[in-house]
Amino acid sequence: MKKICVVTGTRAEYGLLKHLMRGIQNSKKLELQIIVTGMHLSKKFGYTINEILDDKFKIDHKVDIKLVNDTSLNISKSIGIGIEKFSSCFKKLNPDLVLVLGDRYEIFAAAISAMLSRIPIAHLHGGEATEGLIDEPIRHSISKMSHLHFVASEEYKNRVIQLGEDPKKVFNVGALGLDI
């Protein structure tokens, strides 16, 4: 059994990941591990971890990154806390692959920890563009740390390849949200 560790931090990306997580959970060859972080653990954002539990998923770890607000200082502190806590989780879970989606800073912290722990990373929705925000450099950084890339369009596939990634490891799977 290959252990696939999915990291989720927001209701929006969980909605995109849910069916993929169910597929991993139902596989006879894969074991699903789930780490919940970010907005899922915040009462301010609706404590959406309950949606994951309501969907009957087992949560292996909660990583509270002390999400207070989105100032530069607090984002930096949250990333630092996240790197430390994700590293401990990955050591305990010992996954074969870490699966992340998108460009948020809690996912960035998870990717840094997985990379430093020498755990392969699969990145979903890389290659997309968000001008003027920190999302784009974070997304591209996650792509550079990743081993497998599952993108939503040919344009995004080409962008990930332009970042220097191996074309044989970049797959245009379409937008996950279309199935919903």
Image (cartoon, helix red, strand yellow):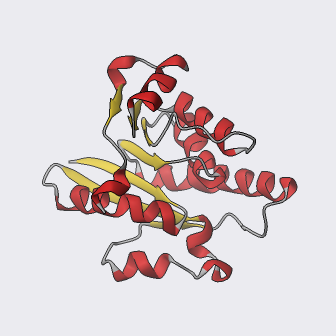
Q: Position of residue 84 (x, y in %)?
A: 66, 52
Q: Please state the total of marks drawn on the protein image.
A: 0
Classify residue 28 as left or right of residue 10. Answer: left
Q: Nearer the viewer, residue 23 or 97?
A: 23
Classify residue 120 as left or right of residue 132. Answer: left
Q: Residue at x 68, y 63 (%)?
A: 65
**Image quadrant in which you'd find residue 78:** bottom right
Quadrant where the image shows the C terminus? bottom left
**Image quadrant in which you'd find residue 53:** bottom left
Q: Residue at x 22, y 51 (%)?
A: 30
Task: Give the answer, above or below, for where 26 lies relative to 136.
Answer: below
Q: Position of residue 164 (x, y in %)?
A: 52, 16
Q: Position of residue 94 (x, y in %)?
A: 40, 48
Q: Residue at x 64, y 83 (%)?
A: 43
Q: Which residue is situated farthest in the left direction here?
A: 28
Q: Nearer the viewer, residue 94 or 55?
A: 55
Q: Position of residue 177 (x, y in %)?
A: 37, 56
Task: Give the answer, above or below, for where 20 lies relative to 145.
Answer: below
